[in-house]
Image (spheres, rainbow, N blue to C red):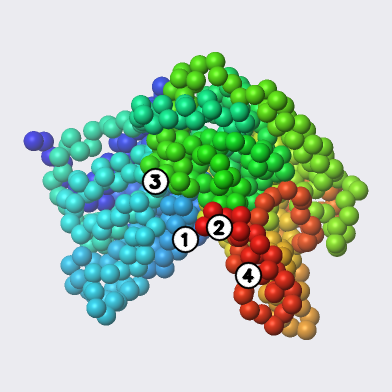
Amino acid sequence: MSTIRLTMAQALVKYLAAQHTEINGQLQPLFAGVFAIFGHGNVAGLGEALYQVREQLPTLRAHNEQGMAHAAIAYAKANNRQRMMACTTSIGPGAANMVTAAALAHVNRLPVLFLPGDTFANRTPDPVLQQLENFTDPGISTNDCFRPVSRYFDRITRPEQIITSLPQALRVLTDPAECGPVTLALSQDVQAEAYDYPESFFALKVHRLRRQPADSQELADAVKALQQAKQPLLVAGGGVHYSDACQRLQQFAEQHNIPVAETQAGKGALAWDHPNYVGAIGVTGAAAANKMADEADLILAVGTRLQDFTTASRTLFSDKPLIQLNVAGFDAIKHNAQPLVTDARLGLHMLSDQLQSWQAGHHWLQTGQQAIAEWNAYYDTVTAAEGIETHTGLPSDAQVLGAVKRAGSPEDVIVCAAGGLPGELHKLWRTDHQKGYHLEYGYSCMGYEIAGGMGVKMASPEREVIVVVGDGSYMMLNSELATSVMLGLKIIVIVLDNRGFGCINRLQNATGGAAFNNLLENCQSTEQGAPKLDFAGHAQAMGALAEKVTGIRELERAMLRARDAEQSYVITLDTDPYCTSEGGYWWDVAVPEVSARDSVNRAHTDYQDAKRKQPY
């Protein structure tokens, strides 16, 4: 057997560079690159190895470990999980900073390879700088925090261990059902140790999307249930995108006359003006889709994990038959569903073959079209540049989104993650292109937005990437704005400054709570109050172009300047923290049983009434 002598780190990056993916008949590297912030735990071993392959496997320097991981995750999402990136840090705080991002990737079922350095396997210099010393288990390090938020975890303590561990890591990263983050903790000394690796280990490997067919009995059961339905509703989730099934879903809906609602991750599966489209569903949903869910006699959920925002905490469609078409058996049986475990594109094709000419009633689709027409009229009202009364007289989030849309292009990508904006976007953003809507709302992680926008731009450099972010999220994590300038990855960032956490303040009030510790005016501060932040000046200090505007018309004009710019551009404006659009559905947020405040007691009574709609 022919061998090649390499350090473990050299062998690892050589293996990664040999991995390819086939997309639409074209071979591309599976890994677009490695985000790296070096420290003593990875600079000598993995850093030197990455330098040697920098042409085949580019290394990108970021400013924050969590931020670079968010960018890597966004890149994978924008590529429908068929291309991805790796992230490496030193042991200690650098590794700990990535744990949040690992949890985000785990919740959203998105692939990213984490390569944190680890303490010495030989333990000779213990305790090394940044080493976490557990008094009862010397084998524990900071990297053990990755275990519950990784789909696959291994600690590499001998150089030959990667021969068995790396193929398992790639299996998980590329598997449609198990997909998620993988962590390989790399002992610092072992990174530099050499081993005679089989040359065959580095042969070019091509990964292709595996499409699992449906079980014949599950398929027959689903067909029978659909044929008995007169008013079925299809709920499209993120799996529709990851399966590249948007066109197949459209054909299925048209052929069988079925209205289609969308989750946050599924948005864009149908264009906003398609005749079968009835809008966003659930807690952040539009009135049209939620009306259809209320009146449906069967739900066909495709590629969604049916989290509580989609099901309105099990109150929206718990009283009717549910078919869960999902590639993951874990998701397919949720909510006492009738499972149909299969790839979304292949599964919809198999269903159509069996259903043949069957269609839902034409009156049912017409009901959906009437409902979405009413919602579209409401959209025109709340997104108008003028004529909207708010509590403060400042623009609403809905008006901002209307302005961004009017100044935009159908090919734009909108990026967001947390706060009140995801709810407004889910209801109000009109998605023309199937990849035009990029929301991280599984983990709803504040700080994802700017880094995520950079990752989307890496995946789609030809498209305008527009990040909308509240002042709270901007303050959480904004450092990758400087990285976007450094790498020439232009993004447009719109900062909505409502002086605090407006979304949670509204939730606090809705559950009977007093305004407290959310809006800056209700926080402990000096007599002068919290400072008014200059977000435009801050963005300029990081190398971006920036300006502050004072109204919706100014925002539209600024958007045109931002689109013409060649580098990242930040626009900031003050917005109202109280105003939100209609729609939505109940969400289970527990209210205290006992309180000295009447408003809380009244809210608890309402809460108990609402919970009676839940099945248990």
x and y percentages locating residue 400 in the rendered image: 77, 48
Residue 591, which numbered label?
A: 4
The Cα–Cα distance between marks 3 and 4, rounded to whole angstroms, is: 30 Å
Residue type at mark 2 is Cys
Callout 4: 10 Å neighbours few (<14), some, many (20+)?
many
Q: Earlier in the sequence, mark 1 or mark 2?
A: 1
Residue 80, which numbered label?
A: none
> Is residue 198 rendered to the left or right of residue 279?
left
The secondary element bearing badge 2 is classed as loop
Residue type at mark 3 is Phe
Task: Work out whether 615 lies above or below 499.
Answer: above
Residue topped by disc 3: 330
Residue topped by disc 2: 445
Q: Earlier in the sequence, mark 2 or mark 3?
A: 3
Callout 2: 10 Å neighbours few (<14), some, many (20+)?
many
Question: Which label lies toward us, 1 or 3?
Answer: 3
Q: Quadrant of the N terminus?
A: top left
Contact, mark 1 vs mark 2 (Cβ under 8 Å): yes
The Cα–Cα distance between marks 1 and 2, rounded to whole angstroms, is: 9 Å
Question: Which label lies toward us, 2 or 3?
Answer: 3
x and y percentages locating residue 145 in the rendered image: 37, 65
Residue type at mark 1 is Thr
Residue topped by disc 1: 100
Residue type at mark 4 is Val
Task: Work out whether 496 lies above or below 334.
Answer: below
> Is residue 518 rendered to the left or right of residue 334?
right
